[in-house]
Image: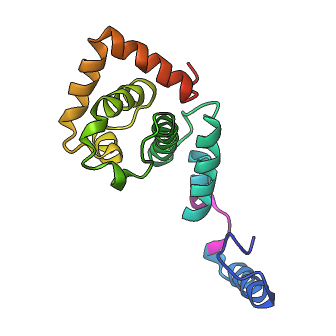
Amino acid sequence: MLEEFELSADKSGARSYASYLEARCVNKAALVNDESLKILRRGWCVGSVSFRKKVMDMLSEQDAIPASTESLSSDALKDLNTAQAEALATRALEALGMPIEANDLYGWGKFKMEKDLIIALLRQFTPVSNKWIAKRLGIGHPSRISIAVRKVRDSQILQQRLAALAIKSKVKI
């Protein structure tokens, strides 16, 4: 609990947490009410930004998807989609022996075909935006995404390579 509140794990952290709880008990506005439960009813992950990131990382590693996404807020759903797209992009980059970090991918013209395959993979299996894909793969303008998808779609050889990449990237079809 102390780690979640970004408090030290020693006595001073415990004292700070106890003070926080006491202040919540005194402050009537901090009690549980309909407004404070709104997030619980709407979302599936409640906690700090660092906690949400840990949960997203765990879910994306397992390609886990909540049983129903109807209860997710748009922000929570976008975060989940982005985490899963990031995990897929990382696996695909690793499978192709390419740099993982987005900054390392800029100016890598020799990986044009590989980037086209990853673009097609991300478009086929994730709902992230073209802008996100362009930034993640360092390809410049988002209009390049539709060109890459069309190129892969129109080539039987690239379609075969895309299928092989999906298998290597552990895509659940």
Is residue 82 placed above or below 148 in the rendered structure? Answer: below
Which quadrant of the figure has residue 51?
Answer: bottom right
Identify which residue, 114 or 26, lies in the foreground.
114
Residue 17 pos. (x, y %): 73, 82
Residue drawn at (66%, 74%) of the image: 5
Residue 93 magenta-drawn? no
Which quadrant of the figure has residue 1?
Answer: bottom right
Identify which residue, 169 or 56, lies in the foreground.
169
Identify which residue, 10 or 44, lies in the foreground.
10
Residue drawn at (54%, 41%) of the image: 72
- Which region shows up in magenta? 30-36
Left or right of residue 144: residue 124: right
Residue 10 pos. (x, y %): 79, 86
Is residue 15 placed above or below 161 in the rendered structure? Answer: below
Left or right of residue 11: residue 108: left
Left or right of residue 5: residue 90: left
Give the total number of marks visible in the rendering. Answer: 0
Residue drawn at (67%, 64%) of the image: 32
Residue that extends furthest to the top in the rendered view of this protein: 156
